Every structure is written in structure tokens, then in C-alpha cells.
Amino acid sequence: MAQKFCCSNLGCKYHQKGNLCGTTAEIGSGGKCRSFEKGLTYYVGLVWAALENKNFIDAMELNADLKIGLYCVMTVYHLGFSTMEWGTCRMYALRAGEDGPMLKTSDIIALPMDEAAVARIVQELEDGHLADMAANRPQPEKGSQPYGWLSPTGTFTEGDFGEHDATARKIIRKNGFWEEFRRWRSDRQSTCRDFLSEVKGYCLIHNPSGGGGYIVAYVKPLTKKQRDFLYGYFMEIGDWFKAEQYVGTET
């Protein structure tokens, strides 16, 4: 005869109100439950733990489960995402809006939660889609890409490390922007690099430290062609997490 028992494992998808189990639990010889399956609370709990005392997640902390947790939290709270890099160090942050502050756990749980989104996530977990996504995602070979300038039309101009302003000058001359640049510069202390970013909407892929890694710097909103280029740029080196930041519909 089946016996009722209490289960306080909130991370299990079978956990029910009142510490009840929603399935037939199988307990192994070591006392461990073999029926445990990761639920929404499990994945979200990983994010809460990672952001409990800080407002960023170090790239070294990321694993498949934490990535699913970030997806869940971003979906149900409608949060934005940003990346910070310095040399080979990379950190990830959640934000309430594109220009909002970096959020800690206490900041996020104070925000309104989309109950309809919660229901969708629970169903995706129930159907196994999220776990399959993490397990089956293709992993291209790691490689490297050149630094340089990317125009609003998606044209990339390579520029070696430390040569970004010189490359910007060449772009300005080649595209007939020189006189416009001189007029623009006449009443300010600015460079060719500033002109391309602030006036012409170029973005720069670079790394000031020269120690590896990639930083995408821009002033004007990225165009769809720039986002499409950046998506492919990072996918080619196997950095799908960064590539997916540039999936968008901007024009």
C-alpha cells in the first residue's frame, strides 16, 4: 500500500503545495529520490543564488542550468540583458530596460511578474523543450575574429588593435565624409572615431586591453543589418550566448 510522505524539495517539478509529491516517488537504497526532475523553481533559484550579493554573473559561473534559469527570469520579468568585458573576463547582467541599472535578486523579485509567461515556461519545462535546447545546441569550433568598424549597412572594415582611429580616418576619406567631419569637429574636441560613432552610426568591435575577448561599442541604436552581422560574427567563433544578444528587428 502506498504511503504518503512530505517532500520539501521546492526545486522539483513534482513538488506541490503542502509539501506533497505530484508523482509516485521512487526512493533509492541510499535514501535519494530517483523521481526528482528539475522545475521552474530550481532554475530560477540558481539565478537568485548567483545574484544574491552582486548584480552580475561571472562567465565562469555559467552552465547549462544557469542559462535556462536566466532565460526563465528574463521571460517572466521582461528583463533586458547586457554583457561587460575586460580582457578575457566577461560578466553578464540583467536590467529592467535597455538603460536600466544592473539588478540583484532583491531588485528583481520586487518587480511585477507576468503570470502568463510563467505558465508558458512551466509548459516548456514540462514538455522538455528547454532541457533539449541546452543539450542539443550546436557547438561550433572556437575561433577568433578581427576587430574593426561596422557600418549601419553591415559593411565591416577590419582595423588592427590600436589602429581604430586611423581606420576611422580611412573610412571617412573613402566615403566622402571628410568635409562634413571637419565642420563637425570645428567646435569640439573630438576624433574620427567619435564622428563615425556619434554621427554616422558605426559600431566598433574592439578590446582596449588587447588581452582577448570582444567589446561592441556604439552610440546610436544598432540597425538590423548590424545586428545580423554581429550575430553571425559571434556564432562563427562559437559564442552563441553573445550572438543571441543581437537578435532583433531594428531598422
Image: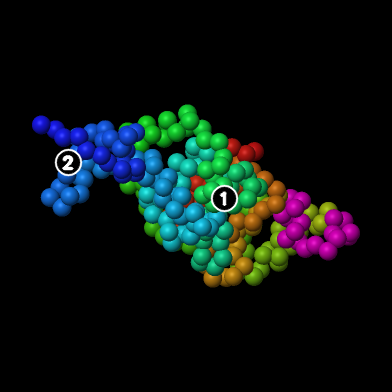
Q: Amino acid at mark 1?
A: Leu
| CA distance for labels 1 and 2 | 39 Å
Res. 170 in view:
no
Callout 1–callout 2 Cβ contact below 8 Å: no
Which is more foreground, mark 1 or mark 2? Answer: 2
Q: Residue at x 32, y 47 (%)?
A: 135
Question: Residue 164 appears at what percent x and percent y?
Answer: 67, 65
Amino acid marked by disc 2: Glu
Return the disc, 1 or 2, that comes first in the chain's sequence.
2
- Reply above or below: 157 against 74: below
Q: Which residue is mark 1?
A: 103
Residue 158 left/right relative to 63? right
Residue at mark 2: 26
Numbered range of the magenta stretch: 182-200
**Residue 14, percent across and down?**
29, 36
Q: Nearer the viewer, residue 159 or 242?
A: 242
Kindly identify which numbered label has been placed on residue 48. none
Q: Tell me if mark 2 has few (under 14), some (14-19) or many (20+) residues whose alpha carbon lies within 10 angstroms of its own.
A: few
Q: Is residue 195 magenta?
A: yes
